[in-house]
Image: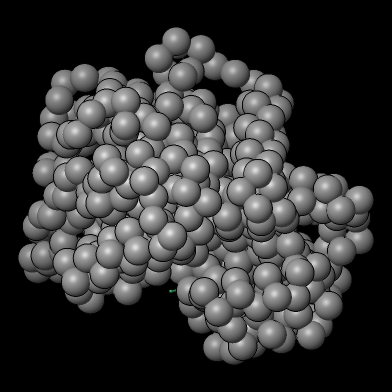
Amino acid sequence: MPSAVFPHAAVDEVLRTVLARNPGEPEFHQAVTEVLESIAPALVERPEYVEAGILERLVEPERQVLFRVPWTDDRNRVQVNRGFRVQFNSALGPYKGGLRFHPTVNLGIIKFLGFEQIFKNALTAQGIGGAKGGSDFDPHGKSDAEIMRFCQSFMDELYRHLGEHTDVPAGDIGVGAREIGYLFGRYRKITNRHESGMFTGKGVAWGGAEVRTEATGYGAVFFLEQMLQRRGQGLEGRRAIVSGAGNVALYAIEKLQQRGALPITASDSSGYVVDESGIDLALLKQIKEVERGRVSDYAARRPSARFVAGGSVWDVPGELALPCATQNELDGAAAATLIRNGLVAVVEGANMPCTPDAVDAFRGARVLFAPGKAANAGGVATSALEMSQNASRQRWTFSDSEQRLQAIIVAVHDQAFEAAERYGAPGDYVVGANTASFVKVADAMLAQGVI
Ligand code: NDP
């Protein structure tokens, strides 16, 4: 019989164990704490989850692979990076999640991302488990030949852990079309199999899906639209503050513009640009996707824009905030500034970009807040559509694929919205997304026994 303190005592014990067993991994602690602290109502209703050790199993990856990645730079010097793949949970389907190449990558970062991915993937209802991987390799400033040699060496180890029914990676920070091409090519060479379904985000000409490039950014805006609609509001004419200038940010800006909103900022690790007449997306894409330049280049070529070195993009007033760069980029102080400046809604295009005190501030101010695991699920959902097309040897059109993406995001939104109501936290998309996805994963784990 559940006790009066149940399930909080059980959650506290699991959290204590996570902290003790995974020292030096603050992002992983943060992600686990946020999920476990918000699913108490589901645990009260279904005490068998606790009795079957679901929580203890959920926070421990099924498999973690760490490996050496040696490669030779253009000056013939040998370089050594670290490779990671954390296969977190496959109860709902093959492991699925991106690869990140960035100097800040370490095991704790990959574990936080892999843990989040379990729940995000469950929300898409596409039958995919959760994983993440990457390396502390920094693609900035490397030649194409160096990128290729690194990707080949990375795949020389990773290939043995992949497969369309086992584990299917995709891109993330620092891993775009170029890197995916080199990684897929090496896998094909090693295995002697053109196994399209083992990687998503491929070029459209060789097994990739329409809309995969746009999916995460577009999906975040579809989610935002749903949240606003529930309050009888829309996107038209609203100033949007967007951070990042990579894949997610560029296509969030594109969809915001298509819906009549006014995105006025973009950023990268050097600073941010603000363009009061609205971002010129063709110019920004040219600089970021073609020239691989910096946002300061945008300001240099656009008279209405100014570049602010360093600083916080969240100082710029706007009604919509879309953090689309990286984890913990929006803290409590930035949240307070945004709220003072008339913020209406926040959508996490990136994974966990808002710190816990920022999220508390949004909740306190009744600002609409969409957590990343729900709002940026469009990328992985479209990856799952890519897997379906690869398996059936079909190719869907851009508009068909976009409609499917939108339908999935509407369903993700509605699940989170309804779960929040059902579990006593109406309007709280954090509670809604976490409980709705947790129940799906926990039910599958329960049915499949103690493994
Ligand atoms: P990209 O590499 O395409 O772009 C990342 C952008 O964020 C760049 O402008 C980069 O600037 C900036 N950035 C990255 N790290 C930092 C940092 N530490 N400080 C300041 N700026 C930083 O990555 P994506 O757009 O693909 O990913 C962005 C976020 O969205 C990540 O959190 C990712 O996990 C998440 N996401 C991505 C999905 C996808 O489909 N791509 C799916 C779901 C979530 P700079 O070039 O100067 O480093």
Q: Left or right: 284 with respect to 330?
A: right
Residue 48: x %, y % from top left: 35, 39
Where is 35 relative to 407, above or below? below
Residue 112: x %, y % from top left: 35, 60
* Residue 361 in sight in this render: yes
State the residue at coordinates (60%, 18%): 396
Q: Nearer the viewer, residue 136 or 177?
A: 136
Q: Left or right: 262 with respect to 405?
A: right
* Residue 131 in sight in this render: no
Residue 449: x %, y % from top left: 23, 29
Q: Nearer the viewer, residue 17 or 222?
A: 17
Which quadrant of the view contains residue 127?
Answer: top left
Q: Nearer the viewer, residue 319 or 47?
A: 47
Q: Left or right: 253 with respect to 448?
A: right
Which quadrant of the view contains residue 162?
Answer: top left
State the residue at coordinates (83%, 77%): 342
Tell me the quarter of the image containing the C terminus.
top left
Where is 406 relative to 3, above or below? above
Q: Nearer the viewer, residue 7 or 131?
A: 7
Residue 68: x %, y % from top left: 9, 57
State the residue at coordinates (65%, 44%): 422
Which quadrant of the view contains residue 263?
Answer: bottom right
